[in-house]
Image (cartoon, rainbow, N blue to C red):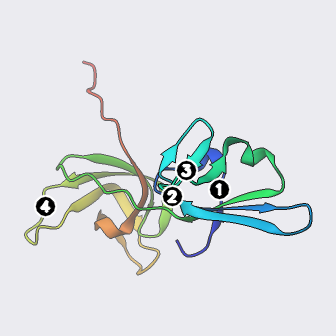
Amino acid sequence: MTEPIAIKYADIRKGDRIRRTEVEHAGTSTVTTGVVYNNTVYGFDSEEGTCLAWKSDDEDEEITLELLERPKAKLPTEPGSVILAKKVRGTKGNFTLFLREQNESNESNWSSVGLIEDKRWGGTYYWHPEEYIDDWELAKVVKAES
């Protein structure tokens, strides 16, 4: 992630690197930065035990929470896996992708149901290398009733 972005408490995930800034009454600021390791009843803690964010932070106008970095989740490796992606090849949308057998160079080959435009390099594609897939979740595949 290049630029910090504002984040709500409910959107923080384990592994996120966040910054919490609290403006004091005298105009000074207290800044806490760290990687979220644990979610307790009070808030999110770092591995060292420092509380990085409290549940009440969203309600306080003098506190800002920023996402500095979010680790990219590893894509499934089982052929036939299906994911729902919100960003592929720089294009935002709702895309269904499935993992085909690995190709001869042993690379994963994700395919889309329809063509997806490549905002970075141009063109439209059905196949998508792992590094071009962002913001995804595992799809729940259910057996059709007959």
Q: Which of 28 and 82 is in front in this view?
A: 28
- How far from the left and from the top, in percent, is residue 85? 42, 53
- How far from the left and from the top, in percent, is residue 66? 65, 62
Question: How far apart in space, not on screen, are marks 2 and 1 (Cα)?
Answer: 11 Å
Select label 1 or label 4 by which is in front. 1
Residues marked 2 and 1 touching at CB (< 8 Å): yes
Image mark for residue 7: 1
Q: In this view, does 37 lie to the left or right of 7?
A: left
> Residue at point 55% right, 50% down?
45
| N-terminal label among 3 and 2 | 2
Q: In this view, does 93 lie to the left or right of 5?
A: left
> Furthest residue to the left?
104
Image mark for residue 102: 4
User: Amino acid under label 4?
Assistant: Gln
Question: How far apart in space, not on screen, are marks 3 and 2 (Cα)?
Answer: 11 Å
User: Amino acid under label 3?
Assistant: Asp
The residue under label 3 is: 45
Q: Nearer the viewer, residue 58 or 76?
A: 58
| N-terminal label among 1 and 4 | 1
| N-terminal label among 4 and 2 | 2
Image mark for residue 16: 2
